[in-house]
Image (cartoon, coloured by chain):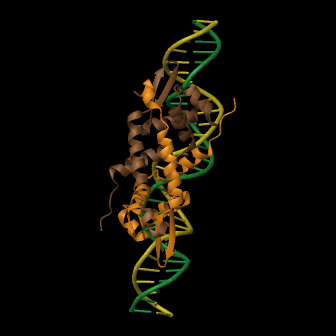
Chain colours: A orange, B brown, C green, D yellow
Amino acid sequence: MEKQEYTEKQIRMARYAKALGNPARVAIIDFLAKQETCFFGEIHEQLPIAKATASQHLSELKEAGLIQGEIIPPKVKYCINKENWMEAKALFGEFFGQCVCKNRQCCG
Amino acid sequence: MEKQEYTEKQIRMARYAKALGNPARVAIIDFLAKQETCFFGEIHEQLPIAKATASQHLSELKEAGLIQGEIIPPKVKYCINKENWMEAKALFGEFFGQCVCKNRQCCG
DNA sequence: TGAATTGTTCGTATTTTTACGAATATATTT
DNA sequence: AAATATATTCGTAAAAATACGAACAATTCA
């Protein structure tokens, strides 16, 4: 029997989930989601990690599409990438909405 | 200035997110969430990976608390861990609900 | 008891992640 | 032009994740 490949949704879900799979990155998003200003320095101030590490986490969030950066010399302003954020929100919403546990004895 | 440690919520979010940060594990949950029966063999059948790897992914999901296993010799029956599933659902719901993008020009 | 079925664990190899300090790049200020 | 401020990139090291086949354990079937 041929094994199923993953669906595009599963791949995209996993990609977003992976990006959120570290407390520093969750903290970054928490911060960005709530603040008006979002320069690198302010973000870094919130985190118990080195500057270089913070920058690296920001890169990963950016690459995953959850945030975006704008250079305003000599600073960099970050914010949520609204479009992808909404996609992720929808994917996770659908994902967590699909469980049929309540109808099954195994999770009772 | 003292750096903030991560909150318990951020740590738990990251933990669940990390567990979902691989397409195989998303596929496993998709399958478990929708099926009545959930023996290892059936799960493995769905996945394009070796038996040992599937078992490994199941262990990670179990350790993260998202699923649970029951031994019914010689099979093992897996299912969603309802309690933690609901916690994760709530955490992600809150997480994705907090963005104030709509009020900000940077994400406009 | 011997063979078959079902999953896990072991051993291993490769890749990725995480983290830090040092060095660098860019623009502003003096 | 030199010094300052801001953030990224580089180099590196250590840990974790991913994947596989082989070996193993537990139970059932013949």
User: Farthest front residue?
Assistant: B102
Residue A17 visible, this angle? no
Q: Position of residue B11 (x, y in %)?
A: 38, 49
Residue at the spot x=55%, y=27% of the render? B40
User: Farthest left residue?
Assistant: B2
For the residue pair B21 and C11, the one nearer the viewer reads as B21
Q: Position of residue A45 (x, y in %)?
A: 36, 67
Q: How many marks?
A: 0
Quick check: B55 above or below B96?
above
Residue A39 visible, this angle? yes
Q: Position of residue A26 (x, y in %)?
A: 42, 55
For the residue pair D25 and A8, the one nearer the viewer reads as A8
Residue at the spot x=62%, y=43% of the render? A7
For the residue pair A79 and D13, the one nearer the viewer reads as A79
Quarter of the picture containing the N terminus of chain A is top right
Quarter of the picture containing the C terminus of chain A is top left
Q: Position of residue B87 (x, y in %)?
A: 38, 41
Residue at the spot x=51%, y=74% of the render? A71
Quick check: A10 above or below C19?
above
Residue at the spot x=32%, y=60% of the render? B4
Quick check: B22 above or below B7?
above
User: Farthest right residue?
Assistant: A2
